Amino acid sequence: MKNIITKFATFALAGYVAAQSAFAGNITMKGSDTLVILAQKWAEVYMQKNPETKIQVTGGGSGTGFAALQNQQTDLANASRSIKPTEIAACLKAFGARPAEHKVALDGLSVYVHEENSVKQLSLDQLKGIFTGKIRNWKEVGGADLPITVYSRENSSGTYEFFKEHVLKGLDFVASAQAMAGTAALLQGVANDPKAIGYGGAAYGKGAKALPISKETGGDAIEPSEENIVAHKYPIWRYLYIYVNPALEKDDVKKYLTWIRSNDGQALVKDVGYFPLPQNLRSGGVAANK
């Protein structure tokens, strides 16, 4: 009985400490590597305006952020995909509530090749073939007679999961795909490899070439431009998110989330290379299951 009481007290104390983090003037953000550059910029500018608040930003992937949120080891989880039902269930078990979901930016998941690659565009079907290993040579899609080197993200990445679900339609990546620990590393690999292809957020494209993508082979290929992404014309677009335990969404945390979604916070989105939310999405959060 004593052990049971001790364990209960420890669990209760841990929950209390986590719940108090919103009041301490310190905010932790963890998760999506896609969002790291933007999250660091938000934190830097916000702390300049609010020196009493300290914000710590780390990456590791969307899955890592959700795990930290479940374990009450971060205030905010950055994610480049929406939360899964299993992750909602884990949060319900851990702190008794669904995380609040905040859309914080728009992104076009760009497909990158080496700058000297002669291929001008690809379709979703061709991408599926390349990344699953059905298409293995650039000449099969109008390029040079070179084997294709596939670069991907690690499986804890929300970008990996989004690409697998929306482009590969749930199929596995080719076994030879080189899994990279972050989008910056992936883009560096693509930029240095004339045979390479990879994918990542729009903010990481320096040094490689982003290809226009068509929904159908032979169809009109769409550039991952702001206009096309905001209008949802580009085939591989997505929202970027921040999730939070509703019990922590008050005081400093609430103020920070409100600022991120304000005109000032959204102006930084474009500076970094992503795309601001339309005005009708710049206020409030919604339950993660809606």
Image: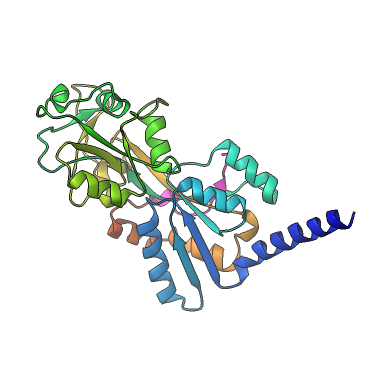
Q: Which residues are magenta?
A: 279-290
Question: Considering depth in this image, is 193 or 79 the residue closer to the camera?
Answer: 193
On screen, residue 221 above or below 202: above
Q: How is the image coloured?
A: rainbow
Q: Position of residue 224 (x, y in %)?
A: 25, 41
Q: Is residue 105 above or below residue 290?
A: below
Query: Which residue is found at the position 12% from the left and 37% from the top?
Result: 117
Q: Considering depth in this image, is 149 or 219 the residue closer to the camera?
A: 149
Q: Is residue 274 left or right of residue 211?
A: right
Q: Nearer the viewer, residue 167 or 136?
A: 136
Percent position of residue 11, x then y:
74, 57
Residue 289 in magenta stretch:
yes
Q: Where residue 66 appears, x then y in whole percent?
A: 54, 48
Q: Is residue 276 magenta?
A: no
Quadrant for residue 267, please give it. Answer: bottom left
Residue that lies at the very extreme toward the right in this rendered image:
1
Look at the image and tell me in which quarter the N terminus lies: bottom right
Q: Say left or right for 71 vs 156.
A: right
Residue ID at (56%, 59%): 74
Residue 260 to residue 131: above or below? below
Q: How many marks?
A: 0
**Quarter location, residue 215:** top left
Residue at the location (28% across, 36% down)? Answer: 234
Q: Quadrant of the C terminus?
A: top right
Rendered view: 273 above or below 129: below
